[in-house]
Amino acid sequence: MNLLFVVSELAPYSKTGGLADVAAALPKALAATGVTVRVVTPRYGFMTAAGEYVGELRAPFGFQVQTARVFREARHGVETFFIDAPAYFHRGRKLYGEPDDPARFAFFSRSAIELARWFGEPPDVIHGNDWMTGLIPVYLRSALRGDPFFARVATVTSIHNLAFQGFFDLRDLPYFGLPGDLQRGPDGLEFGGAGSMLKGGILASDALTTVSERYAQEIQTPEYGFRMDALLRMRRHDLVGILNGVDYDEWNPATDAHLAARYTPADLSGKRLCKADLLKRFGMPVELDRPAIVIVSRLSDQKGLDLVRDVAWRILHAGAYFILLGAGDPRYEVFFQHLRDTAPRRVGVYFGLNEALAHQIEAGGDMFLMPSAYEPCGLNQIYSLKYGTVPIVRATGGLDDTIQDFDRVTGTGNGLKFRAYNANRLMEKIYEGLLLYRQPETWRALQRNGMQADFSWARAAWKYRAVYERVRAA
Ligand code: ADP
Ligand code: GLC
């Protein structure tokens, strides 16, 4: 099995969220199952150290043949190719959010296809991720239809977040090198007046995956379907949910180099040192028996931060520390900064991306809040389990699949979970957490339930492999 994995962000080089973690870990796990994996990703302007120059490729785009430089790196049995096209990818620290995003990622998709040709042998499967690669199967089915090199190449698209649909101006189709009549009709890319690259991926891929079983069901309903639920119901027989894993080489408190101390389920004493270290970092008094409620998150409505805003004062009145690492919506930054300024001995905030601090918060916290409005998979709650930081989550998507509500009587469950999207329901679970925290033995049992669970990538890798085998045979 020969796979081309195409993705717009890749940890540790470029990251806006969990997609970058998946891009780093899944190919590695696939290689371990015997798949030959090549990863393709943009070489953004700030990635000056990524790979070694290996040559140039040409891709027809914008009514001309454009060239891009190719850089290569080999690690953990995976070859990674970085596409260097300064006109599209050199935009400061930003990955997305530019007015010409459609052209940037259409070009990325088109050049990833040409990279396959550049290797000289066609892959069995091209696996793309989210709207940024949605046009790949569209190119193969239209502009490249009849090209013998690609005649037997199958395609898979993974949906990591249905909210981002890759809108573009349909008049640009010819500029992207696609037939202008690809607008309407059963294969049309038209969606609510504009074009949607994600719609292209959903319609034209041989198989679709998403990142939890629960989310695979949810996106077929109007409530979670972002208006694409009917399309997804149409393709439900080709859609599977495969839960993301965790790369325990990166996220393991027993080996994590970012931490002040390391610890295991059998000996949690290092976790107290991590907590002390964390409180000091935020300039707060070190009171180790005071529970620390923490968050690491993009600051977006998806993450249920309006509920957190509603309960923030109650958390402080209940006597807990509150620590947040996040970047995004300025409305939330203003609120949490205000909270910090009002209660600096109880609240710590850091706005921006900080990988080391994300690890330190996972280790130093006692409870991790993730009350998302929707959550395709979510990685932080799974990292929290491993770090003995009890997740408090809303029962949606991957949160529902990974977290079981703790039952005091039987001692089963690995976290605390509520259902309705409501601040009072969230606060009830926080109060329950604070009560359990006061019962050290019960609390340790709850922590250990989470720490001992295994969410490594191997299981998911075999499931992806099965999807590849199926589309190849078809
Ligand atoms: P999403 O992809 O929707 O943001 P996930 O839980 O799947 O949610 O993944 C989020 C990833 O981004 C995790 O690796 C998390 O540690 C990381 N992350 C989020 N915000 C920050 C931040 N401000 N600094 C560092 N890492 C962050
Ligand atoms: C998206 C989702 C998140 C998921 C991640 C990786 O960013 O919001 O739930 O874990 O992709 O698949």
Image (cartoon, rainbow, N blue to C red):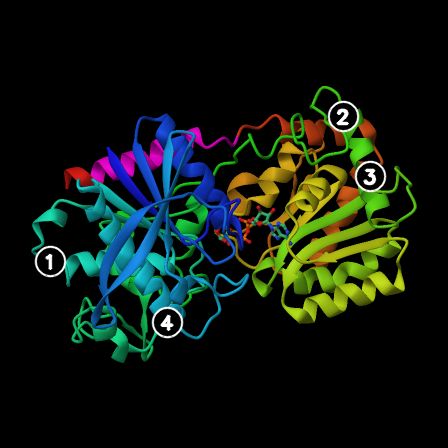
Q: Residue furthest top?
A: 266
Residue drawn 84% across the image and 49% down it = 320
Whichever of callouts 2 and 4 sits on the residue coming sooner in the sequence is 4
Label 2 sits on residue: 268
Label 1 sits on residue: 145
Residue drawn 24% across the image and 74% down it = 175
Res. 405 in view: no
* Residue 375 falls within the magenta-colored stretch: no
Q: Amino acid at mark 4?
A: Phe
Magenta stretch mostly in which secondary structure? helix
Q: Amino acid at mark 1?
A: Arg
Of tags 2 and 4, the one toward the viewer is 4
Q: Relative to residue 148, is residue 357 drawn left or right?
A: right
Q: Relative to residue 456, is residue 115 drawn left or right?
A: left
Quadrant holding the N terminus: top left
Label 4 sits on residue: 167
Of tags 2 and 3, the one toward the viewer is 3
Label 3 sits on residue: 277
Residue 382 horizontal/vertical position (percent): 58, 39
Q: Amino acid at mark 2?
A: Leu
| Bounds of the magenta segment | 455-470
- Distance between the Cα atoms at labels 1 and 3? 59 Å
Residue drawn 62% across the image and 30% down it = 252
Q: Relative to residue 236, is residue 317 drawn left or right?
A: right
| Secondary structure at numbered mark 2 | loop
Say which of 282 and 92 sits in front: 92
Residue drawn 44% across the image and 75% down it = 99
